[in-house]
Image: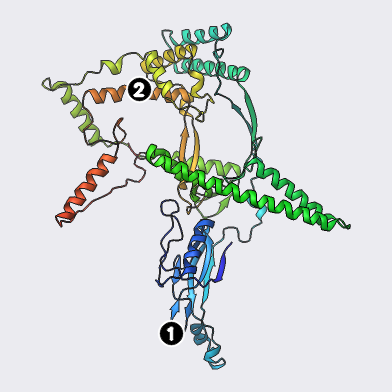
Amino acid sequence: MYLCGDFNSRCSDNLDYIPGIDRLTDRDVIDFSSNQYGDVLTEFLINVNFCILNGRNTITNNFTFVGPQDASVVDYCLIPYENLSMFVDFEVLKVSDILDSTNGYSQLSKLAVPDHSLLKWNLSLDVVGKNYADFKPKCNMVHTKTLYDTKHVGREFLADPEVQREVFHTIDQLESAVVSQVGLNEAYDRFVNIVHVEMSSKLEQKVITISANRRTGKKLRVKKPWWSEQLTVLWTDLCKAEKSWLKCKSNNRQCLKHVYVQKRKAFDSSVQRAKRQYVYQAQSDLEAAVSANSRMFWKSIGNIGIGNERLKSIPFEVKLSDGSISTDPEIVLKKWGSDFAGLLNSGNTISSEVANDINIHNVGLHNDNSMDVPETDHLDSMITIDEILKCILHAKSGKAPGYDNIPCELLKNDSALALLQSLFNRCFISGTVPTAWSKSIITPIPKCSTSDPRDPLSYRGITLAPSMYKIYCAVLNNRLAKWTESNNIICDEQNGFVKGKSTIDQVQSLTTIIETRKLKKLPTFTAFIDFKKAYDLRP
């Protein structure tokens, strides 16, 4: 879809997108004059997620109106943000140049030559010559998912005598003298099955059906945030009144039209009232959040902004290395799996020289009796129930569970704590973890609105790990954090990822330095380094 024509709007260098939300390239502007229509047009484009093609993906950019005394840009091609990459080789062709190349001036008077130029571009489509039906998934890919209400977990959860006997039997298996990887997996799977049985019998649940194209069993939601149930009822009545009026062929038609008009007025009034109330409430909430909670303020900005409405579903198709498009389920899943598997530690290993330097440094630390080596008794001690309970209580409620489908809320009871202590200590002593902990659910989030949605690497993967694995990691992280803090391992300048500190201190320091040097009329040079995939490619 695109819009093209004479809009009588001079937009100058007005932005047609929201910086920080939409990642678009700036336009090559040649007309820096603006008028009221240009301001209205750019505001309209931001609201409808469109942008100006003029000055982007161009071969030649020129004025679109050339008069006797003035030249301007008033003709535009307007396209959606996500389709910008499809419109290439944009050109502005003056009619006079076209006539010169074809000797057209000999047949036309100069007064008859149009003063508006022609806009030309190429449209790059990957579906040219193919049937649209070929781009639908070849299989339905339907599966069901059970959602559990974990907000009201009673004391009877994992409290039955038979269930507790199963839990204690699993603990005995974990605390046996020798536990192999197979035995550890069996004990973990047994506990997971116990929890699943309890969830099915004691928690309220709802089964939904998820397919490649739709999700059923879930209440339909209108995208407009100000919509309400009252508006739904009014809209339904309005549709019924319109249908009755249009289908009527008798003398009662005029009366039905009057009923329809009245319901239409009532619906429009209710819509305007709901919009005003929503905007007023949103403004009040933002004003209250500015002084009370800055984090909630910026979170609210992201939720009510236009960028929140631009989220779209992921297409069930991928773009292969040869440029072709595939919708075969096996190829799509294999492409996603291979691309994300190649992100972490893709062929990176520590060189032998670096390994030798690390070993020599460690040996020197142990042999140098003059140096104070930090105590590690706290790090090597057995994991206690208090440590586990602290991590569970600090875990956020209502979060999506991982591969085992067990949320953290279900682990806040004595039976689960006793088994988790036995499981964590066995993992801590043996240095092995259940194989199921290596399986996670990856939720892809688009990095920007202009990237190709068929490329898996244009998404940022958010991993949903098993809850028990996250609690185990939290216990170890708390120990390391306490040890590094008590032994002054982390330097004072490190504020990122440190509890009780914030990178705002560094921002304040940098701002102070720049302002001080500006007062002294001294230049300041700053280097900001962004390491591409720094965590994915670490050795």
248 relative to 511 in the view: left or right? right
Judged from the image, the secondary structure of the residue bearing numbered disc 1 is loop
Position of 525 relative to 468 (above/below): below
Residue linked to disc 1: 69
Query: What residue is at 67 percent from the left and 44 percent from the top?
Result: 232
Task: Name the side, left or right, on which 416 lies relative to 148.
Answer: left
Q: How is the image coloured?
A: rainbow
Q: Callout 1, which amino acid?
A: Gln
Identify the residue at the far left of this view: 370
Tag 2: amino acid = Leu
Residue 276, percent from left and from top: 55, 49
- Residue 115's tag is none
Q: Which residue is mark 2?
A: 476
Q: Position of residue 171 (x, y in %)?
A: 47, 10
Q: Residue 339 versus residue 195: which sits nearer the camera?
A: 195
The image quadrant of residue 177 is top left
Q: Position of residue 520 (x, y in %)?
A: 14, 55
